[in-house]
Image (cartoon, rainbow, N blue to C red):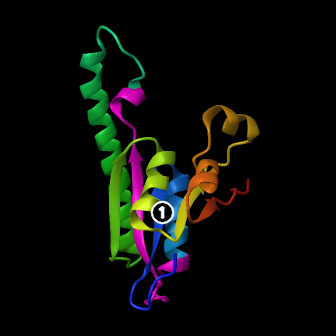
């Protein structure tokens, strides 16, 4: 989607608790929003998908009602930590025009929905570096988004550490 001269394109960055999500955000800021680029053509929106208590627990029956509030509180604390880390990273890199959203749901759907909602031109996600078997069993958010998001999808890989 082309933006007018006065309208910035939207870049959505998906973040999670992992180092991979944080690395994707840091890489994006360094390459598109650095102080050396004060006139970035993009508006930055950071999105974190918070799992629902019912999907995290995955059980129904006696005792489930007592577990849900505890799990929900933990998920909220985790989301708050992700948001705080994203804010700290943006502030440390002098990026102040950023919107951070926490949306409940599966990350695949949350990110694709955010692309639609914000009419994003680019979606940036981190790669956890799963092999074929793990990706087949666990599913890959980046793979799903690459096939289903209606925009360009950039998958940022974290460099391997040298031993």
Q: Nearer the viewer, residue 66 or 91?
A: 66
| Magenta-span inclusion, residue 78 | no
Is residue 15 visible to us here? Answer: no
Image quadrant in which you'd find residue 8: bottom left
* Nearer the observer, 159 or 103: 103
Any part of residue 46 in sight: yes
Image quarter of residue 39: bottom left
Q: Residue 77 appears at what percent x and percent y?
A: 30, 42
Q: Residue at x 50, y 67 (%)?
A: 26
- Number of numbered discs visible in the structure rendering: 1
92, above or below 61, in the image = below
**Vertical position of residue 77 compared to residue 94: above or below:** above
Q: Residue at x 47, y 84 (%)?
A: 41
Q: Is residue 120 left or right of residue 137?
A: left
Camera-side residue of 105 and 22 = 105
Is residue 40 located in the magenta-colored stretch of the structure? yes
User: Residue 94, position in %: x, y?
Assistant: 38, 79
Local packing at callout 1 (Cα closer than 10 Å; few below 14, some 14-19, many 20+) is many
Local SS, label 1? strand
Q: Which residues are magenta?
A: 31-56
Residue 118 horizontal/vertical position (percent): 40, 66
Left/right of residue 89 with respect to residue 149 in the rendered view: left
Q: Which residue is mark 1?
A: 13
- For the point 56% across and 77% down, the residue is 31
Determine whether 101 is above or below 122 in the image. above
């Amino acid at each position: 989607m082309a933006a007018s001269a006065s309208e910035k394109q939207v870049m959505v960055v998906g973040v999670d608790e992992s180092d991979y999500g944080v690395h994707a955000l840091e890489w994006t800021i360094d390459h598109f929003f650095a102080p050396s680029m004060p006139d970035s053509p993009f508006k930055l929106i950071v999105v974190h998908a918070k799992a629902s208590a019912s999907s995290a627990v995955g059980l129904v029956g006696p005792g489930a009602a007592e577990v849900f509030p505890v799990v929900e509180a933990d998920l909220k604390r985790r989301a708050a930590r992700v948001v705080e880390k994203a804010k700290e990273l943006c502030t440390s890199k002098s990026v102040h025009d950023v919107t951070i959203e926490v949306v409940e749901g599966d990350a695949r759907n949350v990110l694709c929905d955010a692309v639609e909602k914000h009419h994003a031109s680019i979606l940036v996600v981190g790669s956890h570096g799963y092999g074929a078997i793990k990706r087949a069993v666990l599913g890959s958010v980046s793979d799903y988004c690459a096939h289903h998001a209606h925009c360009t999808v950039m998958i940022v890989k974290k460099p391997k550490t040298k031993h």
